[in-house]
Structures are given as C-alpha cells and as structure tokens.
Image (cartoon, rainbow, N blue to C red):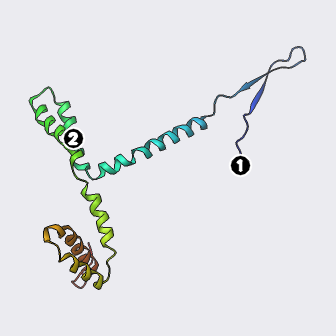
Amino acid sequence: MRLRPHRRYLVVWSQSDGAYQALRVTRPARPRRFRRGLRLGMLLTLRSLLPLARAVRARWRPLLAGVVLTVAGLLLRGSSTGSVVLLPGLVLLLSAPFLSGTPEGRSELERELAVYTTAAQRHDLEATLDQYPDDVTRELRDILARQATAAAGPRIPGCGRR
C-alpha cells in the first residue's frame, strides 16, 4: 500500500484562438496531513504525561481539594473569606507531592499476596509472619485477612454479595 500521488487539475482559461492555454492549479495541502500531525502530537503529549498521571493517582484527593479551595479563594480575594479559603488550598496543593503513594504500592502488594491460594501456602506464610513483630507485619496481615474473607464468600445461606 503506497501513498497516492498529488493530483493536479487542468484549468482552461481561454478558448478564443482555438489553442488552449492551460494552467496547472494545485490543491491546498490536504487536511489529512494536518489531522495526522495533530493526532500524533496529541498522542505523544498524552504518552509523556502518563508518569505524571501515575504520580497523581495516589494523591488526587488532596490535589482536587487544593485546586477547588485555591480557585474559590482567588475568586473571593476581595472579601475576608477569600484568604481564609485560599491559604488551606495552597497548603494542600503544596503538601500533596510529599504524601506517600500507598494505594498504588498496596495494590501491588495485594497482587503479590494473591499467589498464596491454598490453605497450606497461607499457613506457611502466616508462620513466617509470626516470626516478626505485629507492627511490622500489620499491613500484610490485613491484606491476607481481607482476601480470606473475600474468598470464603457469604456464610449466611441465601445471602449474596452486595
């Protein structure tokens, strides 16, 4: 499959003397080229913003609250409530990058712990966790307990999941 050549249209200007005076007129640049370039530019921009989106995903609540409070504070800057609303918004915006990204790390940990499916594997893992203090293994134990209750299903007959 190859690109089609540029087509030129023949325009006749005068037929008075019997001889045709012809002028080749080219069409303006195709809109497809522009659309293709625009689409490619948008895709590259979105692709370059993916790492930023991953970083923001765990911190979206404080960022959203910070943006809303900051915009409200800027809109109300003439009144006394503007500074009361603006300051917490700026604090939330500036503190959001320093928050830990625990939800992303926790979901990765949940996926890794989901490998232990049989009862024997879980008992071996729990025996290993028993060798460490509870404050160190608390998050692992919480994830394992949540997975065990989800796998057990409803214990009341006739009661389905909600």
Q: Secondary structure at mark 1?
A: loop
State whether residue 9 is above or below residue 2: above
State whether residue 130 is above or below residue 18: below
How far from the left and from the top, in percent, is residue 135? Answer: 13, 67
Q: Residue furthest front?
A: 131
Residue, x 17% and y 73% (percent of image)? Answer: 132
Dot 2 corresponds to which residue?
93
Q: Residues within 10 Å of mark 2 (few under 14, many from 20)?
A: some
Q: Is residue 32 visible?
A: yes
Dot 1 corresponds to which residue?
1
Q: Residue furthest right?
A: 18
Determine which quarter of the picture holds residue 30.
Answer: top right
Residue, x 21% and y 83% (percent of image)? Answer: 156
- The amino acid sitting under disc 2 is Leu
- The answer to whether marks 2 and 1 mark residues whose Cβ atoms lie closer than 8 Å is no
Looking at the rendered image, the quarter that the C terminus falls into is bottom left
